[in-house]
Image (tube, grey):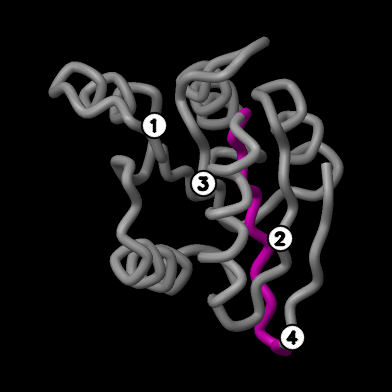
Amino acid sequence: MTEQPGGDDRQHTLLLVDDNPQNLELLEIYASELPGARIVTATNGLEALDAVAANPPDLILMDIMMPKMSGFEVCKRLKSDPKKRDIIVVMVTALSETGDVERAAECGADDYVTKPIDRAALLELMKNLLGRGRS
């Protein structure tokens, strides 16, 4: 896990989770454009749960297909915990079948973004979700 401080007084903690280093780096670059972003990263589902336990984020951008624990399972665990269910979870994945989108929704994901990621659309989505999320 790594952390990168943001530069705004309206800080939001973002947890980025992906087992592919290039994808994780791209997510970090995009997320760092969000004013006030404090970025934490994890490379698998178990690390993500540890990061949430240490300091619950405002928003999680998470891959689905990962070793040790899938994004679906992480999301299901978070959303079933009353203390963590309000954390915003966005699945970021190459999976784009209708069944995958439905499964993400069933697990409690707040939104679903397919790869390749549109930077502007992702930033707008994060701003919108954080606007309705906790401050």
- Image marks 4 and 3: residues in contact by CB distance under 8 Å: no
Q: Which corner quadrant of the image does residue 4 belong to?
A: bottom right
| Residue identifier under label 2 | 39
- How many angstroms separate mark 4 from mark 3 (CA)? 20 Å
Residue at 43% in and 65% down: 126
3D distance between C-alphas at marks 4 and 2: 11 Å
Please state the horizontal and vertical placement of residue 120, each as a whole percent of the image.
33, 71
Task: Tell me the CA gap for discs 1 and 2.
Answer: 22 Å
Tally of marks: 4
Instruction: Give left or right: position of 32 versus 42.
Output: left
What residue span does the magenta drawing correspond to?
A: 8-19
Which residue: 56% across, 47% down? 60
Left or right: where 27 falls relative to 84: left
Per the image, the residue denoted by label 4 is 7
Question: Quadrant location of residue 14?
Answer: bottom right
Q: According to the image, label 1 marks what residue? A: 108
Tag 1 secondary structure? loop
What amino acid type is highlighted by mark number 1?
A: Gly
Q: Residue furthest left?
A: 98
Inter-mark Cα distance, 4 to 1: 31 Å
Residue 91 is inside the magenta segment: no
Report the residue marked by disc 3. 61
